[in-house]
Amino acid sequence: MSNWLKVYGNRRVLCLLGLGFSSGLPLALTRSTLQAWLMTEKVDLAVIGMFSLVGLPYVLKVLWAPLMDRFTPPWLGRRRGWIIALQILLVISIFGLGHSSPASFPAGVAAAALVTAFFSASQDIAIDAYRADVLREAELGPGAATGVVGYRVAMLVSGALALIASDHLPWQSVYGVIAAIMLVCVVFTLIAPEPEVVATPPKDLKEAVWGPLTAYFKRSGAIEMLVFIVLYKLGYDLAGAMTTPFLLDIGFSRTDVGTVNKAFGLLSSIAGSLIGGGVVARIGINRSLWVFGIFQAISNLSFTGVALVGKSYPAMVAAIGIENLSGGMGNAAFIAFLMSLCDKRFTATQYALLTSFMAATPILAGAPAGEMANMLGWAPFFAVSTIGGIPGILLLARFAPWNGKRSVALVK
């Protein structure tokens, strides 16, 4: 216990809990929570569907990440300066979004949501860069874990809790409360420490744009590394794409799925993140990637068991617990791994680039998953999905060998 307190009680690690919360808080306000508000205002479904486009800044954020590497605000340093500025802008944009009118002027709501999403995606760039810069190598796992925990808790606040509050308060008040919570998040930025090593920022925009790409791609195996990033969680994401349809198809209600898969799954994921961060601190990133990668692949078999047993609440709870526990552990190690690849001069841009490849995995996995399930049936589908984890595990031998360090060419 004392070792865990030492790892997670460190100021550099602990502050990331609050910054992770700040990062996750705006997300649902432009997605699920906003959709619920639009539905209550009787906005046409076709219009609601178009609102998904306001999420584009999260996909395109790598395009302006170089600006945040190049320029340093005149307060609180290069990373914290951007974070606090964007937090204040988010307070204003969230409040403005809450006072827009979906029924009479949906275009205005869309514009306000797009601005909020842009500030939110930009805050993600700054917080991700700060996390990679402030942590020592031994703290990467715990730091990744605390950030994920804060992020998940914030999504619960602006998602599920905001929806519950909307049954008792006007939507303007709900968004106003979230804006006030975002203002409190400024405190996390103020008390966060500056990185011990302050890297020299790019000298101009040309270096800010091309420097990160040149620094990364001049490494031997750089392209293969991007392939590895896409493949590492392939098997896990392949199964995850069909979890909800599977549970509904075999007879569980939407309430069952919402309560167990979302609420209990969230708690399991948080536990997995914290355990994973502690394990990374103890055995290192390389070995953790091996252990958690294998665990993630095997966890798919728990849903094969549910498919064979049928509608069984104990089996469902166990499968969801195992899946989210393994996913939380894997995320802690994998995020730590991605942070370790970044050159501190260009952390914002390189981390945004690497995580964009990471974000591609659920999309690539989800596309064929439904057809595979139709062809194979549920039990064989989840069994076969474990094979999706093999390519990533095999590539670990090159990029994160069990008994050695990564190739020198891949170290910043």
Image (cartoon, helix red, strand yellow):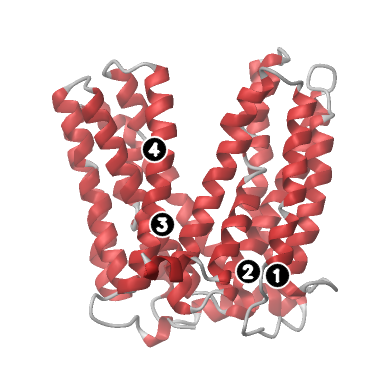
**Foreground tag (4 vs 2):** 4
Q: Nearer the viewer, residue 115 or 312?
A: 312
Q: Position of residue 24 (x, y in %)?
A: 60, 47
The label nearer to you, 3 versus 1, is 3
Q: Secondary structure at mark 1?
A: helix
Q: Is residue 77 left or right of residue 353?
A: right
Mark before the other along the chain sequence, 3 or 2: 2
Picture quarter with the N terminus: bottom left
Residue type, mark 1 in image: Arg
State if disc 1 and disc 3 touch (CB < 8 Å): no
Q: Residues within 10 Å of mark 4 (few under 14, many from 20)?
A: many
- According to the picture, the residue beneath numbered tag 2 turns out to be 130
Question: Looking at the rendered structure, which numbered label has been put on residue 274?
Answer: 3
Determine if residue 349 is in view.
no
The Cα atoms of the two marked residues, 4 and 2, are separated by 28 Å
Residue closest to the eye, 304 or 64: 304
Q: CA distance from mark 4 to mark 1?
A: 32 Å
Q: Are marks 2 and 1 in contact (CB under 8 Å)?
A: yes
Tag on residue 265? 4
Callout 3 touching callout 4 (CB < 8 Å): no
Residue at 35% in and 49% down = 327
Task: Using the numbered discs, state the Cα–Cα distance from disc 3 to disc 1 in whole angstroms.
Answer: 25 Å
The image quadrant of residue 256 is top left
Whether 202 is drawn above or below 183: the answer is below
Q: Earlier in the sequence, mark 2 or mark 1?
A: 1
